Image: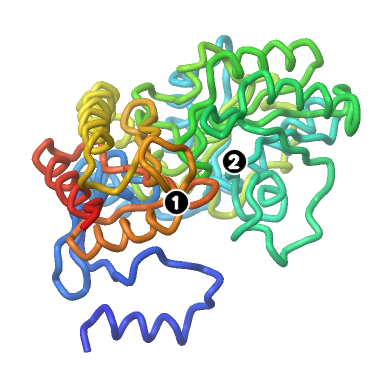
Amino acid sequence: MSQNALLLSRRAAAVPQGVATATPLFAERAENAELWDADGTRYIDFAGGIAVLNVGHCHPRVIAAVRDQLDRYTHTAFQVVAYEPYVALCERLNALAPIAGPAKTVLFTTGAEAVENAVKIARAATGRPGVIAFGGGFHGRTLLTMAMTGKVLPYKRSFGPLPGEVFHLPFPIAHYGVGVEDSLRALSLLFAADIEPSRVAAIIVEPVQGEGGFHMAPPELLQALRRICDEHGILLIADEVQTGFARTGRMFGIEHGGIEPDLMTVAKSLAGGFPLSGVIGRADIMDAAQPGGLGGTYAGSPVACAAALAVLDVIEEEGLIARANAIGDRLRTTLEAFAARNDLLPIGHVRGPGAMVAFDLLAARGGDEPDGAAAKRVTARALERGLVLLSCGIHGETIRLLMPLTASDAVVDEGMAILEEALSAL
C-alpha cells in the first residue's frame, strides 16, 4: 500500500467527513510552486493552499523570520503581555490600506474570525444590527459568517437556524443575466420590504468573489455602494481575505474599484501559510469597541506576525504586484487560445484581475450553460498528470488558478501544459 493510501485510510478513521479534502494526497515537502507527496511524487501547485501562498511555499525570508522569532518567544497572548511584531505589523498594514486618514488594525487568526469581528466593530460603531452581503459570496464557516455566505451547499445545510438580520443581494454576473442595475434594484427593494437603511450596520462585498467563481465586482457597483453607504450612514466592508496582498495586481482588490472602504478584512496570504488575519479600518470606527471586546488567545501570534512582516518585505522587494499582472497576462492569453480550439473541452468566460484568473467549463462551445461535472473531471485529470487545481463557482463549473506569484515562467508554463492535456476532449 502506498503512503498516500495508508494515510488516507488513517484519515478516514480519525477525521470526520465534514472536513473535505480536494485531493487524496498527503504533503511531504514543498518549495515555491512545487510540492511532493508522501510517495515522493512531484506536483505543480496551482492552488496555493487556497490563495494563501502568494509568496510560495517556504519562502526563505519567511522561514528565516519565523526561526528568529521562535528563538525569542512563541506566545504571551497580546492581551496579557504585548509584543513589538504585532504593533509593527499593524503599522505596516495601516500604511498600506487604501483608507484616507488615520487607520488602525486588530489581528486575529482566521478569515472567518476577521469577518465576524468586522461585523462586531460595525455594529458597535453604528449601533445597528443589519448586515447585507451578496449571493455567491463566501465569508466563512462560523455561525454568523455562514449566514453571510451566499451559498447553501455545502456550507449551510443542516446547520440552521442561522443568525437573523443578514440579507443577500444578487451579485452582478453578465453571463448569468445579472447586471449592476439588478443588484442596485434589489437593494432598493430590500430597503423597502425587509430592513430600513437606518437599521443596517454594514454592507460587505468581496472585490472579486472567491468561492463564488472569481467574478469581479464592477467598479460601478462599488462606487454605487459607496454612495449609498455614505447617504445612509452604513459602513462598507471589503472582504479582502482572498484578494489581498498582490493577488489581483494591486495590493488590495478594492483598489480596482476606485473607492475607499470603511473596514477591510485580511487573511490568507498575509502570513505565508501561518494562521493570521486582521481587520483594518478607519481609526474612529476601529475604536468603537470597548477594551476587552476584541481579541483572542492566539490572535496575532508573534510567530505569524514575524512571518507577515517578511511577506510584506518580499512583496515589495520582489515586485510581486507587477509579477501578478505579468502572470495574469500570460494565463489569460493561453486560456483564450484554449477557448478557441475545437480539440479541447469547451471553456469560456476567461476572467480575473492580476493573477486571480479563472475560466468556466461549458456544456457547449460558445454557450453560457455551465458544466460542473466537466470541471470536476478536469481537476482529476490534472492531478493524475501532476497539477493541483481547484474548482469553484455557483455550479462548480469554474477552474481557478492560484499559483504562487513567485512561480517561475517555466513552472507556470509547465502547469499550463498539463492543464491543456487535462482539457483534451479525447
Residue at the spot 49% in from the left edge and 33% down from the top edge: 215
- Cα–Cα span, label 1 and label 2: 20 Å
Instruction: Please tell me the numbered disc located at residue 371.
Output: 1
The image quadrant where one finds the C terminus is bottom left
Viewer-nearest of labels 1 and 2?
1
Residue at 48% x, 52% y is 396
Q: What secondary structure is marked by label 1?
A: loop
What amino acid is labelled 1 in the image? Asp
Mark 2 residue type: Gly
- Marks 1,2: beta carbons within 8 A: no
Q: Which of the marked residues, 1 or 2, is nearer the chain's N terminus?
A: 2
| Extreme residue in the bottom direction | 1
In this picture, is 288 found above or below 375?
A: above
Q: Which image quarter: residue 285?
A: top right
Q: Quadrant of the N terminus?
A: bottom left
> In terms of depth relative to the viewer, which is nearer, 398 or 142?
398
Numbered circle sitting on residue 137: 2
Residue at (70% x, 11% y) in the render: 227
Q: Is residue 407 in view from this perspective?
A: yes
- Residue 197 x/y as whole percent: 85, 23
Please tell me the numbered disc located at residue 304: none
Indicate the position of residue 236 as horizontal and vertical percent values. Answer: 67, 23
- Spot occupied by residue 352 in the image (x, y as percentages of width and height): 39, 30
Label total for image: 2
Looking at the image, which is closer to me, 290 or 335?
Answer: 335
State left or right for residue 95 relative to residue 320.
right
Q: Is residue 126 above or below residue 342?
A: above
